[in-house]
Image (tube, rainbow, N blue to C red):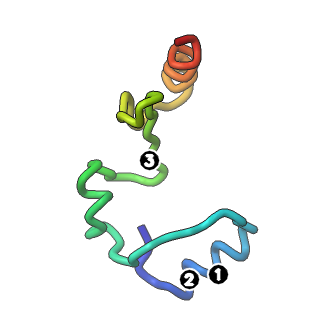
Amino acid sequence: MDKDAAKWKEAIAKDGLTWTQVSNLKFWEEPIAQQYNVEAIPATFILDASGKVVAQDLRGAELKAKILELLAK
C-alpha cells in the first residue's frame, strides 16, 4: 500500500523488518487490495487450514475468539 519506493524502503530499514517485503507501489490502486476490499491499514485476514479467508478486519475480543475457535478445530 505504498507509492514512494524510497520512503517504503526507509520504513522497512527503520522498523528492522527482516522478512520479505513486496509492493508494486500502486497505493490504493493495488489490484490485490481491491480484490480483498482493503480500505484501511492495518487490514487483517484470518485463513482456515485450507487457505480460505474465514474472517476479515476483526479486532480485540472478536479477533481472539475467532483465532481460538479455529485453533480448537
Which circle's residue, 3 or 2, is located before the other in the chain? 2
Placement of 8 over or under 48, stated as above or below = below
Residue type at mark 1 is Glu
Say which quarter of the image contains residue 7: bottom right
Which residue in the structure is indicated by mark 3?
A: 43
Quadrant of the frame with the N terminus: bottom left
16 sits to left or right of 7: right
Please name whichever residue, 5 or 59, is drawn nearer the observer in this view of the structure. 5
Residue type at mark 2 is Lys
Distance CA(mark 1)–CA(mark 3): 22 Å
Distance CA(mark 3)–CA(mark 2): 20 Å
Distance CA(mark 1)–CA(mark 2): 5 Å
Residue 59 placement (x, y as % from top left): 50, 31
Which circle's residue, 1 or 3, is located before the other in the chain? 1
Residue type at mark 3 is Ala
Residue 6 placement (x, y as % from top left): 55, 88
Residue at the image point whose x is 49% and y is 20% from the top: 66
Dots 1, 2 in contact, CB < 8 A: yes
Q: Which mark is residue 7?
A: 2
Helix, strand or loop under label 1:
helix
Please name whichever residue, 36 or 70, is drawn nearer the observer in this view of the structure. 70
22 sits to left or right of 1: right
Which residue in the structure is indicated by mark 1?
A: 10
